[in-house]
Image (spheres, grey):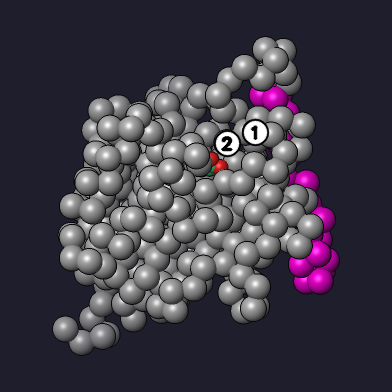
Amino acid sequence: MSIESIQPKLIIHGGAGLCLRDKDGKERVRTVLLGIVQQIYDLLLEGSSAVDAVIKGCQLLEDEPRFNAGTGSVLQSDGQIRMSASLMDGTNQSFSGVINVSRVKNPIYLAQELQKQSDHILSDYGAAELLRELNIPIYDPLTDLRLQEWMEERKHNFSSKTAGVIAERTGTIGVVALDNQGHIAAGTSTGGKGLERIGRVSDSAMPAGNYANAFAGVSCTGIGEDIIDECLAAKIVIRVTDGLSLAEAMEKSMAESRSRNRELAAIALDHQGNIVWGKTSEIVLAAYHNGKAMGDSLDATPTESMGRY
Ligand code: GLY
């Protein structure tokens, strides 16, 4: 197969968790996700690199207030927003990210910048300093809805395990792309699980939650602690690298996660153009373009654990 004939592939997600509240909500999420898939897939068709497509896709998802990343991030136990994001370029096998950054519109841009620097992952103070160095304007990602939700949780003395019970609140966002040169990249961004104590570190800026190499790329969503305990993204990618098919790697990893009662989901694609999602949660808000058509995971039943395209 000549290099020119590689067909781009794309999968994105807007979180995982319990089922969406209503049918209207589901259709709105579907419209948003498919709109972003179309926009990013068009860029890939125009020759955009997988890395650039992932950054743009993450930015669009971060800017969509219904998802828990960038604008619309959930609040932590002290009522503050602290976001985490990472980018992995599968070709160079290079990971970069920010942990617990505040007052910025698009954390994914910091992860992008850190690909070029010798220090690849920065946390709170360092990330704030980088923002200043880059002259990125201060931005408050808080929405009225998130503040109301936090006030409601406060009334109940923050007794919930996470900041919400619907997928749009408990998740992260993520993008995995294969470009027309056969390169893979993955990006993930989150406001965290919500209501966490100060200093808690999310999986989204760790290889457990976001990983890619020349063979495959994965972005995870769900409860960060569960994803870290499974080392999910890196595990799926390594399994593909060592010879399992993408579907086998996802299936095995989800079966293991389920046996340990994990609450998580993942999206993935490989260098051959296979696309899959997997979940132990009731729902994952995933959408894809497989080169022929777009589709999504929103009609999957709560017990369905995988989709492949
Ligand atoms: N998966 C997002 C988080 O738990 O922080």
* Label 2 element class: loop
Residue at (27%, 40%) from the top-left corner? 256
Q: In this rendering, is residue 307 above or below 309?
A: above
Q: Amino acid at mark 2?
A: Lys
The magenta stretch spans residue 9: no
Which of the two residues, 3 or 171, is positioned nearer the viewer here?
171
Q: Which residues are magenta?
A: 128-150
Residue at (36%, 62%) from the top-left corner? 217
**Ligand 1 neighbours mark 1 (CB distance < 8 Å):** yes
Say left or right for 136 vs 16.
right
Cβ atoms under marks 1 and 2 closer than 8 Å: yes
Q: Which of the 4 image quadrants contains residue 6?
A: bottom left
- Percent x, y of residue 91: 40, 78
Residue neighbourhood size for the residue with mark 2, other residues' Cα within 10 Å, grouped as few (<14), some (14–19), many (≥20):
many
For label 1, the residue is: 196
Q: Quadrant of the N terminus?
A: bottom left
Q: In this rendering, is residue 28 above or below 232?
A: above
Q: Is residue 266 visible?
A: yes
- Percent x, y of residue 114: 63, 71
Which of the two residues, 83 or 182, is positioned nearer the viewer here?
83
Say left or right for 200 vs 5.
right
Say left or right for 198 vs 211.
right
Q: Which mark is residue 81?
A: none
Q: Residue furthest top?
A: 156
* Label 1 element class: loop
For label 2, the residue is: 193
Rounded to the nearest angstrom, the CA distance separating label 1 from label 2 is: 7 Å
**Ligand 1 neighbours mark 2 (CB distance < 8 Å):** yes
Q: Amino acid at mark 1?
A: Glu
